[in-house]
Amino acid sequence: MGGLVLALVLLCVVGIVTTGGRFASVGNITTLLALAATTGVVSIGMTFVITAGGIDLSVGSVLGLATVWASTLSTQYLAEDYGWWVIVLTALAVGLAAGLVNGALVAYGKVPAFMATLAMLAAARGLAELIAGRQTQLVEVDPFLDTFRADVLGLPMIVWIFVVVAVAGWFLLNRTTFGRRTVAVGGNPEAARLAGIKIKRHTLYLYGLAGLTAGIGAVMALARTTAGSSTNGTLLELDVIAAVVVGGTLLAGGRGTITGTVLGVLIFSTLTNVFILNNIDSSVQAITKGVIIVGAVLLQQWFAAREKATST
């Protein structure tokens, strides 16, 4: 964890030195945190799935579908009549439903997680395109925009949502039976089964949780962009998985860290911000991210081999 903090501090120093102070401005830091918030929330749900030895490639498409469904004219008409919470509940319901479908396919259909969520990635994006007609749908419910675009104590509301979800995720993973069961399932599924953990049901819950955080991310995306689109969340799953892995959660399962995930999100967001401020080509950004991800996985394997050698 100390290495992640050091990496984040070094990136901040590089940003301050190379941008002539623009990086450290209040406006830039606020923008950086706002951009990190959506990825961060979805990453919390992904942390649970990967900790349990699974993977969810569909979170970006599910987020896009949720923004589209929550911004249809019918949904907005209902929101005008009954309150902005209709938009929020619609996005959460879409995300949760998609997550539960993934979970059912993986747990009860015995479809490999990679294939099940890859299918959802394609299906959710296609359904979003059909619903929206490949058009962008503007959100015009002012109470919703006023609520979620407001600043609280100098920070955008969506940043506070990220903070709340991160704290809740940390508590759930580290201080509850649900979290202990998640780690047990990822570490040794057979031992977890013999210990009385209902593996299939727990897996269903985990993918439902990942879908729910994608739904929360959709609400945040709607607030930030004021538009629902089938292109929302494109390639988000890559950023999310990268943040989780760089943060220290094992791809093989059995160990997860919410604090590490938050640091991973901030590291990638800061890196992107520094590159943008220095007008560095986006291709270089992509290459750098790839190198960081590979380095993180190699370090995981090295530490795992070291622990195994020490235990024997």
Image: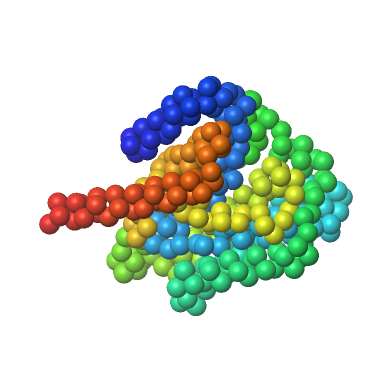
Image height check: is 132 above or below 115? above
Report if residue 253 is visible in the image.
Answer: yes
Query: Which image quarter holds the C terminus?
Result: bottom left
Image x and y of residue 174, in percent: 40, 46
Report if residue 66 is visible in the image.
Answer: no
Identify the residue at the far left of this view. 312
Image height check: is 271 above or below 154? below
Query: Which image quarter holds the N terminus?
Result: top left
Q: Residue at horizontal 34%, vertical 66%? A: 189
- Foreground residue among 164 and 39: 39
In screen coordinates, is 280 left or right of 246? right
Q: Residue at horizontal 53%, vertical 33%? A: 278
Question: Colour scheme of this structure image?
Answer: rainbow
- Foreground residue among 37 and 166: 37
In screen coordinates, is 77 left or right of 47? right
- Foreground residue among 75 and 230: 230
Identify the residue at the far bottom of this view. 109
Image height check: is 150 above or below 77? above
Q: Residue at horizontal 46%, vertical 65%? A: 203
Please state the total of marks drawn on the protein image.
Answer: 0
Image x and y of residue 45, in percent: 51, 53
Quarter-of-image position of residue 277: top right
Q: Residue at horizontal 43%, vertical 26%? A: 13
Image x and y of residue 83, in percent: 81, 47
Image x and y of residue 50, in percent: 42, 58
Image height check: is 284 above or below 151? below
